[in-house]
Structure formats: C-alpha cells, structure tokens
Amino acid sequence: CSFEHGTSPSGVARDTVEACVCGEGFYTDRRALGLWQRREPSVGPVCRICPSGSVCLTANLTQPTQPEGHYLLQTGVVWTAYKCIPAQKCIATEDPTAARCAEHFDGEFLACSRCAPGYHLLKKTCEKCGEPRGLLLGVAFIVVVIVVIG
C-alpha cells in the first residue's frame, strides 16, 4: 500500500487498490481512502492514529473502539478520547457512535457527565427520581407552623 500505515490483509492480492487497509493502532478515514482509491488529491491522511485512551487492535477499523472509563467523541473524521470520572459512567463498546454511557447516564453530554432525564446523581450512579413527597411534607410542615404561630 502506498499510504502511510497502510497494509494488506494476508491472503489478499497486494497489488489492488481495494486491498489496502490501515494497520493496528490506526483507524481509516473513509473519505480520504475513497479519494486515494480514485487517485484524487486527499484532504488528510488515510490512516489516523487511534486517540490515547481508545483501542485499535485490529487492522481496517473505520473508528476506534471505546474502552471502559473513556468517552469517544467524533469531530469530522477525527476521534478524541475523554476520561470519564468516575470510570464506570462510560462503558466499553465497539461502536462509540451508539451507546457509550452506563445505564441512566446521558450520552448526549460529554463524558456521560449528566444523568438521563428523570434520574439524579447519587453516589456515582444515576437513580430514578422519586415522588416529591419530602418537598410536600416540608411545605405542609411550614404551613402548619405558620398557622399555629400566627
């Protein structure tokens, strides 16, 4: 393969354009690969290095995998890994564009930093919001005290 970090899988004819893939530790920028295959000028490298905190252990990945404790975010064709605190908020996944947060954490927010709607953070986990009984009892108590004093 004539692009940096490119390789050909074993058993595949190495002289064909379609046989070139990115090696371990890299993921494939599909847009740049398509341009390279058509022999057109590229806008960037075909093989992009796996971001620190992610995993690219096999050749020919089009995106890195997300290990537990990290959150992968894609901007254009570039992936960035963020450390999740606490680590159990972010789950390991082969597809970081799908589910990436632990149950009841909201994946729409960076590094699963918020609980999903209807849940609140309690001791590093998201717990379902209960009925506001405590608030109602507190208000009722204040009203009784005001009536008795007043």
Image (cartoon, grey):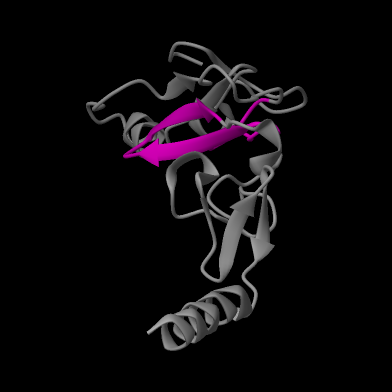
- Can residue 128 be seen at all in this image of the molecule? yes
Q: Check if residue 140 falls in the magenta segment.
A: no
Q: Check if residue 72 falls in the magenta segment.
A: yes
* Placement of 1 over or under 32, stated as above or below: above
x then y, percent, for residue 99: 62, 54
> Which quadrant of the figure contains the C terminus?
bottom left
x then y, percent, for residue 145: 49, 79
Residue drawn at x 60%, y 52% is 121
* Residue at the extreme right: 11
* Residue at the extreme front: 149
* Placement of 53 over or under 98, stated as above or below: above
x then y, percent, for residue 75: 34, 38
In magenta, the rendered stretch is 59-83
x then y, percent, for residue 123: 69, 44
Residue drawn at x 69%, y 42% is 91
Quarter of the image for residue 2 reads: top left
Residue drawn at x 41%, y 39% is 74
Residue drawn at x 62%, y 80% is 133
